[in-house]
């Protein structure tokens, strides 16, 4: 980690700022604003932003924020290998390939929302609402809960640390761990939060974090659903509060993700 980034990280407060006043909607700074550009320019915790931007894709339906976020992170970690990657063959139907040269494979090896779900994860139709058993009862569990999201990434061989943001979680410690991840190479963080807690329409949502700005004590959420909300900077306290919300069986939270054998940012 660069010395400047380390000094800024050590300077982070023991507890994050109070965030938005009680009862007030969180102040979100939209990506395209001048203030947003200033925050990114001065940030010393934005290592993840560039590979995530290069591999960013957005949702094409209202349910798949988890699979989309997983595909972005997997490609950021692995697409440079160009071998051993899965193919998504849905973009060109078999009958549409009739005029391609014989033996020509038009598909790239890459991760997409259509191929990150496997036999070791929640299935596509279960993500779309086919009932699964929770607590001994069939439940229509749309999308991916935090631990289900972790299983998607582990099914592809990644190392994943699960952080549930419950009532005992220290907001300052959460912010420092997220900032450490964003200042280090080759590891990423996905957050699972409640949109309503940020004053946005919708329910639970998953997206990657791209940067942390110490001066404003805020994180950049690279929202994978621009149809609903743009990328935004959100105050640390407000992000923690949005993750400290209940989802089906436990609170939401975040995942720290890297290749196996790499020292995770949680312990650096």
Image: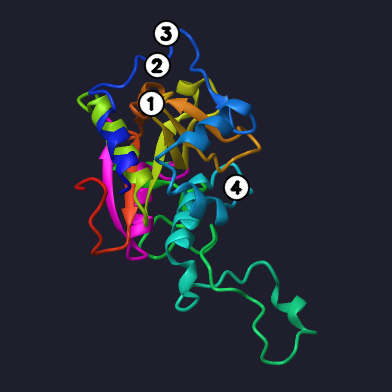
Q: Earlier in the sequence, mark 1 or mark 2?
A: 2
Judging by the rendered image, the residue that carries numbered circle 3 is 21
Q: In the picture provided, is 254 more to the left or to the right than 64?
A: left
Distance CA(mark 4)–CA(mark 1) = 25 Å
Q: Residues within 10 Å of mark 4 (few under 14, many from 20)?
A: some
Distance CA(mark 3)–CA(mark 1) = 13 Å
Indicate the secondary structure of the residue bearing disc 4: loop
Indicate the secondary structure of the residue bearing disc 3: loop
Query: Residue 90 or 220: which is nearer the viewer?
Result: 220
Residue 190 image position (x, y, % from top left): 40, 44
The residue located at (40%, 39%) in the rendering is 44
Judging by the rendered image, the residue that carries numbered circle 1 is 236
Tag shown at residue 245: none
Quarter residue 181 falls in: top left
Query: Residue 50 or 76: which is nearer the viewer?
Result: 50
Q: Earlier in the sequence, mark 3 or mark 1?
A: 3
The span picked out in magenta is: 140-166
Q: Residues within 10 Å of mark 3 (few under 14, many from 20)?
A: few
Foreground: disc 4 or disc 2: 2
Distance CA(mark 4)–CA(mark 3) = 32 Å
Label 4 with label 3: CB-CB less than 8 Å: no
Quarter residue 200 falls in: top right
Judging by the rendered image, the residue that carries numbered circle 4 is 59
Distance CA(mark 2)–CA(mark 3) = 7 Å
């Amino acid at each position: 980690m660069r010395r400047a980034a380390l000094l800024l990280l050590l300077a982070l407060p023991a507890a994050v700022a109070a965030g938005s006043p009680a009862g007030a909607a969180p102040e979100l700074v939209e990506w395209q604003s001048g203030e947003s550009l200033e925050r990114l320019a001065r940030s010393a915790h934005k290592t993840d932003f560039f590979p995530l931007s290069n591999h960013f894709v957005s949702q094409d339906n209202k349910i798949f924020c988890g699979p989309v976020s997983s595909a972005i992170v997997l490609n950021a970690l692995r697409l440079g290998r160009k071998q051993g990657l899965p193919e998504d063959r849905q973009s060109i139907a078999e009958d549409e390939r009739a005029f391609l040269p014989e033996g020509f494979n038009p598909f790239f090896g890459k991760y997409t929302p259509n191929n990150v779900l496997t036999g070791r994860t929640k299935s596509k139709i279960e993500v779309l609402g086919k009932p699964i058993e929770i607590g001994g009862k069939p439940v229509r569990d749309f999308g991916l809960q935090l631990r289900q999201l972790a299983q998607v990434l582990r099914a592809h061989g990644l190392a994943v640390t699960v952080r549930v943001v419950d009532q005992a979680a220290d907001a300052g410690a959460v912010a420092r761990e997220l900032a450490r991840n964003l200042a280090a190479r080759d590891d990423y963080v996905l957050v699972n939060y409640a949109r309503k807690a940020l004053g946005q329409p919708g329910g639970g949502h998953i997206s990657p974090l791209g940067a942390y700005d110490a001066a404003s004590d805020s994180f950049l959420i690279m929202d994978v659903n621009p149809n609903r909300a743009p990328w935004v900077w959100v105050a640390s306290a407000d992000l923690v509060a949005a993750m400290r919300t209940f989802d089906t069986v436990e609170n939401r939270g975040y995942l720290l993700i890297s290749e196996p054998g790499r020292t995770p940012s949680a312990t650096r």
